Image (cartoon, rainbow, N blue to C red):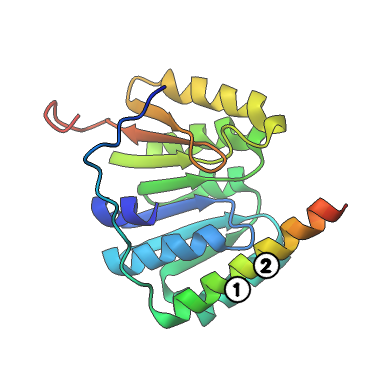
Amino acid sequence: MLYDNRGFEEGQMAPMDRAVQQVLDEYEVRSAAEEKRWHEL
Amino acid sequence: MNLLIKEAESKVILEVGTSYGYSTLWLAEAARETQGRVITLELHAGKQQYARERMQRAGLADFVDFRLGDATQSLADLETPVDFVLLDLWKDLYVPCFKLFHPKLNPGAIVVADNMLFPESSRTHASAYRQHVRSQADMQSMLLPVGSGLEVSRCTRGLSAVEV
């Protein structure tokens, strides 16, 4: 299936507040560590 | 999902499968903006506790109603109509869960089901779910090949012809 994205303007979400962003970052770190562990099995 | 909820101004957001709460965080952040709430269901007490602590640290705990137990029982007991559902638990439970919350969907409610394409071991159940949703006369549905594959469905029951 072809996808025509001409004319598409990339948007960016408004930044999260600091407390939310901090916890989101922790989840990212945890996820990366888990993925690494899976690859090492 | 965060943007979908904000755009639709969804008030009652149901998450079937909290796990460690990553999605819950995005849902709760949206709920704070729509002045809504997230009802999130989880079987495993340890996972729920992990998610609960993170919601507190993110300042979003007031927007999340954590419910512990078997999802099918929690859905049978669900006391409120819902505007948005994220379905992300054991894949063999997708159809039974859908059957339980389907009558409680508000007009225009959106249902997002994860893992439609990956992992491959889930595809049989994922396919059965898609077939079931698409066989419902009051649901519109499409597969988005994003992430692990999302089936995004909309309840048209109670909508006017213009809204559909």
Taking the spot 28% from the left edge, 63% from the top edge, the residue there is B34
Above or below, comparing residue B52 to residue A3 in the picture: below
Q: Position of residue B30 (x, y in %)?
A: 35, 63
Residue under label 2: A30
Q: Position of residue B44 (x, y in %)?
A: 71, 59
The residue nearer to you, when weighing B163 against A28, is A28
Amino acid at circle 2: Arg
Above or below, comparing residue B63 to residue A3 in the picture: below
- Which quadrant: the C terminus of chain B? top left
Question: Is there CB contact under 8 Å for labels 1 and 2?
Answer: yes
Amino acid at circle 1: Glu
Taking the spot 46% from the left edge, 81% from the top edge, the residue there is A19
Q: Count residues near mark 2 (Cα–Cα under 10 Å), then give few for <14, some for 14-19, many for 20+.
A: few
**Numbered circle sitting on residue B58:** none
| Quarter residue B152 falls in | top left
Q: Position of residue B92 (x, y in %)?
A: 66, 33
Side of B107 relative to B129 (left or right): left
The residue nearer to you, when weighing B70 against B92, is B92
Side of B91 relative to B28 (left or right): right
Above or below, comparing residue B79 to residue B136 in the picture: below
Q: Residue furthest right?
A: A41
Chain letter of disc 1 in the image? A
Q: Residue furthest front?
A: A6
Report if residue B9 is visible in the image. Answer: no
Residue under label 1: A26
Taking the spot 63% from the left edge, 57% from the top edge, the residue there is B19
The residue nearer to you, when weighing B57 against B157, is B57
Q: Position of residue B21 (x, y in %)?
A: 57, 63
| Quarter residue B94 falls in | top right
Side of B30 relative to B157 (left or right): right
Chain letter of disc 2 in the image? A
Question: Is disc 2 on the same chain as disc 1?
Answer: yes
